[in-house]
Amino acid sequence: MLSKFTTAALAATLSLAATAALAGAGDYTFEPVKAEMKKGDDVMLAVRLTNKQTGKPVADAVVFKTRVDMAPDGMAEMESAVAPLPSKEPGVYAFKTDLPMAGRYQVTMSVKVQGEPETVTGKVVVTATK
């Protein structure tokens, strides 16, 4: 027969295992650092990646795919080149791109988060003004 302590320890271990098993790519959120900026060439976009469970920024994610286009305004074919910039704060991923006309742009990022087996993909919308 198991002691009360052993039963409680076993229950706690199973609970932690279940919580870890529930963690996944959906446990992260992407948000623009600045949702509105002036249109133009060499515009700096920054996206914050946060762990929803902890509320903390996710530093050291490996960004392997980034796309900027005008899909929110029905012009997904209007794609701009993206170049990474050095990060100035943990959990913020910055890029240089062209926003040639006023309107809404969608930033799509696919990243690998350390310890997360799934690819984490997110989309944010920013607005370029005149």
Image (cartoon, rainbow, N blue to C red):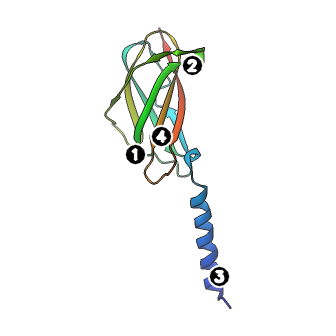
Q: Earlier in the sequence, mark 1 or mark 4?
A: 4
> Residue 66: x percent and y percent?
44, 30
Label 1, label 2: how many angstroms apart (C-alpha)? 28 Å
- Label located before the other in sequence (2 or 4): 4
Q: CA distance from mark 3 to mark 1?
A: 37 Å
**In the foreground, 20 or 88:** 20
Question: Which residue is under mark 3?
Answer: 7
Percent across and percent down for residue 21 are 59, 59
Which residue is disc 1 drawn over?
59
Point 47% across, 22% down: residue: 68
Mark 1 in CB contact with mark 4 (< 8 angstroms): no
Q: Which disc, if any, is residue 10? A: none
The answer to whether the residue labelled 3 contacts the one labelled 2, judged by CB atoms less than 8 Å apart, is: no
In terms of sequence position, does the residue under pointer 3 or pointer 1 come before the other? 3
Residue at horizontal 38 percent and vertical 31 percent from the top: 94
Q: Earlier in the sequence, mark 3 or mark 2?
A: 3
Q: Amino acid at mark 4?
A: Leu
Please name the residue that numbered disc 2 is placed on.
71
SS for tag 1? loop
Q: Earlier in the sequence, mark 3 or mark 4?
A: 3
In the picture, the disc for residue 49 is 4
Q: Residue furthest left?
A: 86
Disc nearest the viewer among 3 and 2: 2
